[in-house]
């Protein structure tokens, strides 16, 4: 298709074209009701059907057991930094947090407001202090902690866990904001999973929480009702007016994922996309990636040019070629290509082709 633009934004990220086209077609007249889905009462049977189907499709995709509640909430991922601490530390106000980047640090900042938090280094000491650090696989965990928290994928640095930490009898809590639905995951390994929507689920503002039933009675008594998982579960995520249009769009994305063949197929696609870009960068003397190979993210791939003075020219020419939102995070610099589920491999190939052309132009 001519004039295609590939959006490599880390979030809000691109949505599947099929989903946006369906939403566009239904925008003013949903299900021949003569109104938009965003105008429906969240208490109406028409919207409840949308919400119920979205939850069931997510359960199907992730094989979520019946003893887990699925919540569609407001506040994004950052809102859950506070909510999970309020909900899980009420009877035991201490938790272990594994730190691998900016988002795990931000989660700690919220949890420290309500309880005692231990920050555990997520990396092993590098043989060369200047070299990349491998992810740790063992920690001195507190067996009496309310939970152990980690961020599976750190979008800023492009660091991702290729394994699920072992935490024994202590519930494992995962921030899956930027990796959820990118491949199969065993939900039963977790006490709680949360994710902001704006990467692989839908538009920003929505968060999904998957919480095991036995953790719904651990909240502080003064937890605000709008953040109380037990109260929200009892109300089917409709304690107040939820973000109905975002919920509807998430449901369309879930259906799209099913049509693609589910999470096994998405995992194969996402690995192929990541391998394509990493292999090119590793073979190049013009570009580099400083993340340990075993800790590299499939979703967010940072890379540096050999000369930072070329960054602005790279970004300008990339934009002209239809490759947008490639500027790296301000804390890291360089470039970052976010290749979530909606990014086709053709987009990654177009980026590699451009990178190769740009490198040759610069000699």
Image (cartoon, grey):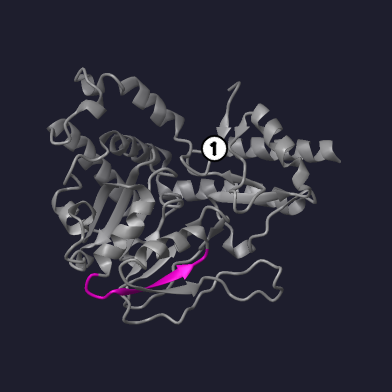
Query: Is 8 positioned to the left or the right of 48 in the image?
Result: right
344 vs 233: above or below: above
Residue 348 versus residue 302: which sits nearer the camera?
302
Q: Magenta stretch containing residue 22, yes or no?
A: no
In the displayed structure image, the side of residue 114 where residue 150 appears, left or right:
right
Whole-percent x and y of residue 238? 18, 44
Inspect this view and state whether residue 353 appears.
Answer: no
Give the magenta part as a residue range.
90-100
Task: Identify which residue is drawn at 77% across, 43% down.
Answer: 309
Task: From the viewer's perspective, tell me whether residue 161 is left or right of residue 23.
Answer: right
* Residue 129 on image: x %, y %: 69, 72
Q: To which residue does mark 1 refer?
A: 344
Give the secondary structure at mark 1. Answer: loop
Quarter of the image holding residue 20?
top left
The picture places residue 72, in percent across and down from the top left corner, at 27, 47
Q: Residue at x 19, y 20 (%)?
A: 33
Q: Nearer the viewer, residue 124 or 164?
A: 124
Residue 6, percent across and down?
57, 33
Quadrant of the snapshot with the N terminus: top right
Q: Is residue 293 left or right of residue 54?
A: right
- Crowding at dot 1, Cα within 10 Å, few <14 / some 14-19 / many 20+, comes out as some
| 72 in relation to 312, above or below | below
* Residue 34 appears anywhere in the view: yes
Residue in the picture at 58% in, 63% down: 295
């Amino acid at each position: 298709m001519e004039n295609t633009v590939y959006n490599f934004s880390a979030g809000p990220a691109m949505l599947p074209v099929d989903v946006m086209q369906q939403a566009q077609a239904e925008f003013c007249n949903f299900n021949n009701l003569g109104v938009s889905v965003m105008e429906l009462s969240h208490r109406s049977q028409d919207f409840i059907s949308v919400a119920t189907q979205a939850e069931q499709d997510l359960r199907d995709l992730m094989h979520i057991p019946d003893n887990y509640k699925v919540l569609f909430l407001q506040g994004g991922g950052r809102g859950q930094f506070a909510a999970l601490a309020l909900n899980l530390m009420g009877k035991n106000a201490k938790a272990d947090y594994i730190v691998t980047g900016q988002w795990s640090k931000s989660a700690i900042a919220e949890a420290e407001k309500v309880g005692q938090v231990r920050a555990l280094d997520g990396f092993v000491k590098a043989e060369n202090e200047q070299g990349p650090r491998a992810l740790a696989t063992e920690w001195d965990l507190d067996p009496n902690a309310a939970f152990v928290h980690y961020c599976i994928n750190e979008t800023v640095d492009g660091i991702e866990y290729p394994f699920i930490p072992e935490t024994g009898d202590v519930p494992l809590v995962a921030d899956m904001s930027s990796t959820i639905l990118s491949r199969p995951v065993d939900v039963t390994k977790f006490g709680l999973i949360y994710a902001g929507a704006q990467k692989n689920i839908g538009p920003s503002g929505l968060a999904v929480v998957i919480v095991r039933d036995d953790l719904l009675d651990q909240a502080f008594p003064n937890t605000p009702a709008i953040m109380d998982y037990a109260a929200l579960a009892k109300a089917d995520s409709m304690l107040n007016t939820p973000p109905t249009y975002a919920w509807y769009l998430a449901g369309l994305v879930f259906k799209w994922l099913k049509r693609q063949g589910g999470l096994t197929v998405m995992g194969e696609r996402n690995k192929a996309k990541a391998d394509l870009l990493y292999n090119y960068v590793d073979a190049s003397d013009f570009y580099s990636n400083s993340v340990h190979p075993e800790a590299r993210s499939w979703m967010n791939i940072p890379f540096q040019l050999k000369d930072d003075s070329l960054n602005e020219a790279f970004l300008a020419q990339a934009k002209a070629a239809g490759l947008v939102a490639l500027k790296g995070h301000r804390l890291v610099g360089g470039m970052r290509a976010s290749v979530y589920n909606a990014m086709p491999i053709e987009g990654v190939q177009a980026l590699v082709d451009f990178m190769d052309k740009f490198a040759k132009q610069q000699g």
